[in-house]
Amino acid sequence: MAGVGGSSPYHYHTRNEEALFVLSGSGKIRLDDELLAVTEGGYVSLPADESGAHRVVNDSDDPLTYLAVSTMAEPEVTVPPDSEKLWVFVGSPPGGRDDRQVHGYYRRDDDVDYWTDETPGGNDDAE
């Protein structure tokens, strides 16, 4: 990651564990509500739940290079808690290159009832 900036919004994965290994440079990682220093040789393990929420930030003009490893399982729902959204990946996990049958970013406030826009008892043509 070259120059000042963040890798992605603060988020956690519901299915995929991740690990980060810093190859060169230094920066910060947000874990919970703490901003911790990361430096060359540093390793962070991120479980697949709220406790694994993270955001990597390069706070210098020098490049920060790290290796990110993921279990790459799908389907996956990723949660960025600061923005109250859900990221949905079906067919290929985040970072995957295969086609996805379902993929999108959704506001949690858009939650609807199970039967909204559905016909109870089915809406097929079978008689």
Image: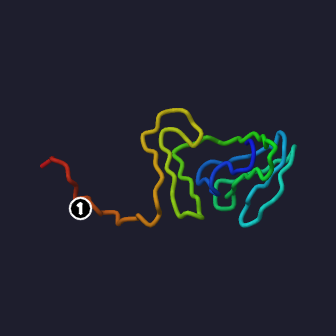
**Residue at the extreme top of the image, as rendered:** 98
Residue at screen point 64% across, 54% down: 48
Using the image as rendered, state which of residue 116 and residue 127 is in the foreground.
116
The residue under label 1 is which amino acid type?
A: Pro
Q: Residues within 10 Å of mark 1 (few under 14, many from 20)?
A: few
Residue 59, percent from left and from top? 78, 53
Residue at screen point 51% across, 52% down: 87
Residue 37, percent from left and from top? 83, 56
Q: Left or right? Give the position of 62 relative to 17.
A: right
Q: Left or right? Give the position of 6 relative to 28.
A: left
**Residue at the extreme left of the image, as rendered:** 127
Q: Is residue 57 above or below residue 82?
A: above
Q: How many marks?
A: 1
Residue 58, percent from left and from top? 76, 50
Q: Is residue 107 above or below residue 1?
A: below
Q: Left or right? Give the position of 84 relative to 113.
A: right
The residue identified by callout 1 is 120
Residue 18, percent from left and from top? 69, 47
Quadrant of the drawing holding the N terminus: top right
Residue at screen point 15% across, 47% down: 125
Q: Quadrant of residue 82?
A: bottom right
SS at badge 1: loop
